[in-house]
């Protein structure tokens, strides 16, 4: 029994030893296989390629960012489309208007309540202005009729008497200006003068004011300065005195307010003047620009 027992133990020991050796051999084989498969050079190359790929991606992303920045910087500050202007800058917000800049009074003509409405023109065209116009009209008309009388020395006395100028006064000049304003209000600038003085075709106000011949004379002889004493260097010299006198009267009788528009106007005129302007888009085409 003891001999059998010892032989069994010995066999068991051998089996155990054999199993341990096989396990060690298997472990060494696996380690050797792993060592043979592991290549540090290949792994390093993979890392470098990965790093290169990452760096290339970062460079490409940086270049894209730089290009986007350049594209943004190259964009215009304003863009117009269909009449609308777009800007990259914000519109400055205006604050409240100062109380000192707020005009609380309305447009009005001073002293209008104390005088009749028909005297409105006298606020701006004073007696001094009208008397100056009367003076220059009479001087020019007298010189014109004197020349006509010299040229008709051999004619009869009746014809010479008809070539005399009747002096103009301020009242008649005001009547003449009133007819001009009346024709402008009624838009009679394209009507014949003979039709305006014909009672059957128009109002009798023209014929009741003055004769047609007198009206034509006043249109022909109206002057605002003496041509012999005119300043040739001043283009506004023919109406300089009238214009400056009119401007002086404006602040005396007119009180402006915030609802006031300063605009330009083309007054129709086709006469001889050095500063007549041509504007094709205007209805009058030719005129004086004020």
Image: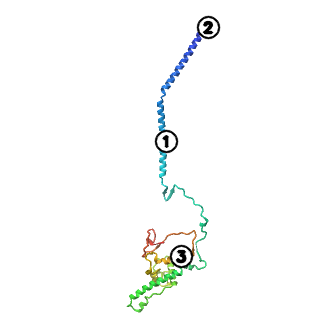
Give the SS element for disc 3: helix
Tell me, for residue 248, which label it has, or none: 3
The quadrant in which residue 124 appears is bottom right
Residue at the left extreme, as displayed: 154
Tag 1 and tag 3, C-beta contact below 8 Å: no
Give x and y (percent) for residue 183. Answer: 50, 78
Q: Eyeballing the image, is 213 above or below 87? A: below
Inter-mark Cα distance, 3 to 2: 154 Å
Residue 35 at least partly seen: yes
N-terminal of the pair, mark 3 or mark 2, is 2
Inter-mark Cα distance, 1 to 2: 81 Å
Q: Badge 1 is on which residue?
A: 58
Give x and y (percent) for residue 286. Answer: 44, 72
Q: Which residue is found at the position 51% from the left and 56% from the top?
A: 86
Tell me, for residue 2, which label it has, or none: 2
Give the SS element for disc 1: helix
N-terminal of the pair, mark 1 or mark 2, is 2
């Amino acid at each position: 029994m003891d001999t059998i027992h010892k032989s069994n133990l010995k066999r068991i020991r051998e089996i155990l030893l054999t199993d341990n050796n096989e396990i060690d051999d298997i472990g060494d084989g696996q380690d050797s296989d792993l060592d043979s498969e592991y290549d540090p050079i290949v792994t390093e190359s993979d890392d470098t390629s990965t790093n290169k790929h990452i760096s290339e991606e970062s460079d490409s992303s940086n270049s894209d960012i730089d290009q986007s920045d350049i594209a943004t910087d190259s964009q215009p500050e304003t863009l117009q489309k269909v009449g609308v202007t777009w800007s990259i800058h914000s519109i400055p917000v205006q604050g409240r208007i100062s109380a000192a800049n707020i005009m609380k009074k309305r447009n009005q003509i001073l002293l209008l309540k104390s005088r009749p409405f028909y005297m409105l023109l006298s606020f701006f065209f004073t007696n001094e202005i009208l008397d100056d116009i009367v003076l220059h009209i009479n001087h020019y008309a007298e010189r014109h009729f004197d020349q006509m009388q010299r040229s008709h020395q051999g004619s009869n006395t009746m014809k010479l008497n008809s070539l005399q100028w009747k002096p103009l006064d301020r009242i008649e000049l005001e009547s003449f200006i009133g007819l001009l304003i009346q024709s402008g209000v009624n838009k009679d600038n394209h009507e014949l003068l003979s039709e305006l003085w014909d009672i059957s075709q128009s109002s009798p106000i023209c014929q009741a004011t003055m004769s047609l011949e007198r009206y034509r004379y006043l249109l022909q002889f109206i002057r605002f300065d003496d041509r012999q004493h005119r300043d040739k260097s001043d283009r506004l010299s023919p109406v300089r005195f009238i214009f400056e006198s009119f401007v002086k009267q404006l602040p005396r009788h007119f009180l402006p307010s915030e609802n006031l528009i300063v605009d330009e106007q083309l007054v129709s005129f086709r006469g001889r003047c050095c500063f007549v302007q041509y504007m094709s888009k205007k209805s009058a085409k030719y005129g004086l620009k004020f």
